[in-house]
Amino acid sequence: MKPQQLLRLGLPEGTPLRLAREFIRNFMAAGNPSSGIETGIFQVVADPAAFFRMKLSVYKDIHTVMAAQSDLVEILGRFDPKLVKMCPAGEKAED
């Protein structure tokens, strides 16, 4: 579905249009029939928070997945990212 078609359906420009396009990409990538797209788009626009909750629910806990696949994987290390404060532009770094 092109942006012009979405606008003709009454979708406002900006975030709703972006969410609709993202929904379409994910909907089609999941192998769903194109006949349900319009209904899904209006559900996303009506309740964007539900769309984001749905997206977050597809991620699994990496530790659970790795434990279940222990016969297939060998853990070589662990990466725990930390927040790093960057020095302001023009100032000398502390290290």
Image (cartoon, rainbow, N blue to C red):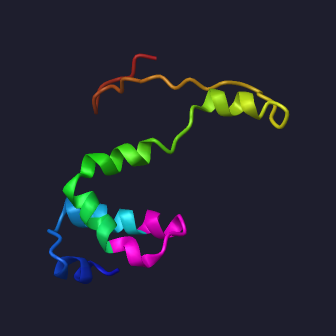
The span shown in magenta is 25-37
Where is residue 60 shown, x and y percent of the image? 56, 37
- When the figure is inspected, residue 72 is found, relative to residue 85, above or below; the finding is below
Is 4 on the left-hand or right-hand side of 23? Answer: left
- When the figure is inspected, residue 8 is found, relative to residue 25, above or below; the finding is below
Q: Main secondary structure of the magenta part?
A: helix
- When the figure is inspected, residue 5 is found, relative to residue 47, above or below; the finding is below
Where is residue 83 shown, x and y percent of the image? 42, 24
Count of residue discs: 0
Name the residue at 50% across, 45% down. Answer: 58
Residue 28 highlighted magenta (yes or no): yes
In the picture, residue 8 is in which quadrant?
bottom left
Is 59 on the left-hand or right-hand side of 54? Answer: right
Name the residue at 77% across, 28% down. Answer: 75
Q: Which residue is nearer to you in this view: 39 or 92?
A: 39
Name the residue at 36% across, 27% down. Answer: 86
Seen as rendered, the residue at the extreme right is 71
The N terminus, quarter of image:
bottom left
Q: Which residue is nearer to you in this view: 72 or 53?
A: 53
Name the residue at 32% across, 81% down. Answer: 2
- When the figure is inspected, residue 13 is found, relative to residue 65, above or below; the finding is below
Residue 86 highlighted magenta (yes or no): no
Where is residue 55 shown, x and y percent of the image? 42, 48
Where is residue 95 shown, x and y percent of the image? 46, 17
Q: Which residue is nearer to you in this view: 93 or 67?
A: 67
Is 67 on the left-hand or right-hand side of 37? Answer: right
Seen as rendered, the residue at the extreme top is 94
